[in-house]
Amino acid sequence: MPWFIYYNDTLIPVEIKAFTIDDAVKAGLNIARELLGTVNRYCLYVGFNDDVIEFWRGDDGAVKLIYSENPTEALTHFYNAEKRRLVRCESVR
């Protein structure tokens, strides 16, 4: 399945080799830091056929790393899970 970055309402395909969620978080952190400068926290959604990791700089900037054949559908799953409080967030050290 392909990886995408979602930033400024744009989906951008990216080459990432991640075999675990931790690998994906590390790879996504590097990309998010390039785009945002700093990252304070990330939020994680793991679905049946897709994963979304959202990286935040404070409360005003976000970059999403999406693993899915259909990234727009994955975003819908993420937002629905977020409304149901099923998305887990962690601080970045």
Image (cartoon, rainbow, N blue to C red):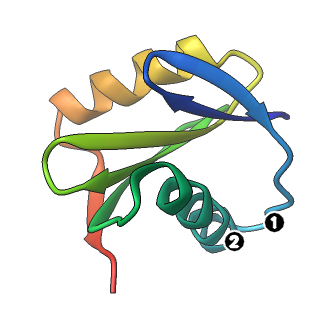
Q: In which quarter of the image is the N terminus?
A: top right
**Going by the image, does 31 lie left or right of 60?**
right
Residue at x 79%, y 63% (from the top left corner): 18
Q: Residues within 10 Å of mark 2 (few under 14, many from 20)?
A: few
Compared to residue 93, the image places residue 51 above or below, namely above
| Image quadrant in which you'd find residue 11 | top right
Real-space CA distance between mark 1 and mark 2, rounded to the nearest whole angstrom: 6 Å
Compared to residue 10, the image places residue 47 above or below, namely below
* Residue 28 visible in rendering: yes
**Going by the image, does 89 lie left or right of 71?**
left
In terms of secondary structure, where does tag 1 sit? loop
- Residue type at tag 2: Asp
* Near-viewer residue (37 or 91): 37
Q: Mark 2 points at which residue?
A: 23
- Residue type at tag 1: Phe
Q: Mark 1 points at which residue?
A: 19
**Picture mark count:** 2
Residue at x 27%, y 42% (from the top left corner): 61
**Going by the image, does 60 lie left or right of 3?**
left
Furthest-bottom residue in this view: 93
Residue at x 27%, y 68% (from the top left corner): 40
Mark 1 vs mark 2: give the one in front: 2
Residue at x 83%, y 34% (from the top left corner): 2
Cβ–Cβ under 8 Å for marks 1 and 2: yes
Q: Residue 37: x, y in percent?
A: 40, 61
Q: Residue 55: x, y in percent?
A: 39, 53
Q: How crowded is mark 1: few (under 14 residues within 10 Å), some or many (20 or more)?
A: few
Q: Residue 15: x, y in percent?
A: 86, 46
